[in-house]
Amino acid sequence: MTSSLTRQDVEDALKRVLDSHNRSPWLDTEGAAVYIGSTPGTMRTWRAAGGGPRYHAIHGKSVRYHVTDLDAFIRGEVAR
């Protein structure tokens, strides 16, 4: 799989995620993907398959990931 993102794109995205993390521990799909080194598409695929990091659906529409759940997923401590 090839990516059209440049190193600067990734660094900018990570900076946005970390900046938003300083305000809130809740990340949207794009932010969560950057945080764990994945892609938004992979995050959506995991959700549809019932896997990946724990997430919270808000009013059945918006999805947010808590950084503690993302950290647990990275460590392999996934609990559904």
Image (spheres, rainbow, N blue to C red):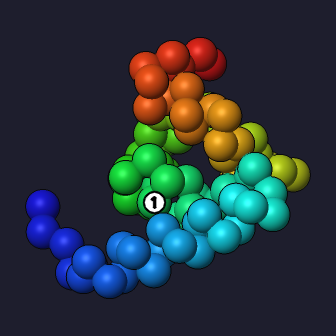
Q: Which amino acid does label 1 sit on?
A: Val
Locate residue 34: give its quadrant. bottom left
Confirm whether residue 50 shows in the render: no
Label 1 Cα crowd, 10 Å radius (few <14 / some 14-19 / many 20+): many
Confirm whether residue 59 shows in the render: yes
Q: Is residue 77 above or below residue 53?
A: above
**Furthest residue in direction left, as rendered:** 1
Q: Residue at x 75, y 50 (%)?
A: 25
Q: Residue at x 12, y 61 (%)?
A: 1
Q: Residue at x 81, y 63 (%)?
A: 23
Residue underneath mark 1: 34
Locate residue 20: give its quadrant. bottom right
Q: In this view, does 54 lie above or below 66?
A: above
Q: Position of residue 41 (x, y in %)?
A: 40, 58
Is residue 55 toward the left or the right of residue 74 in the image? right
Identify the secondary structure beneath mark 1. helix
Q: Quadrant of the C terminus?
A: top right
Is residue 74 toward the left or the right of residue 28 in the image? left
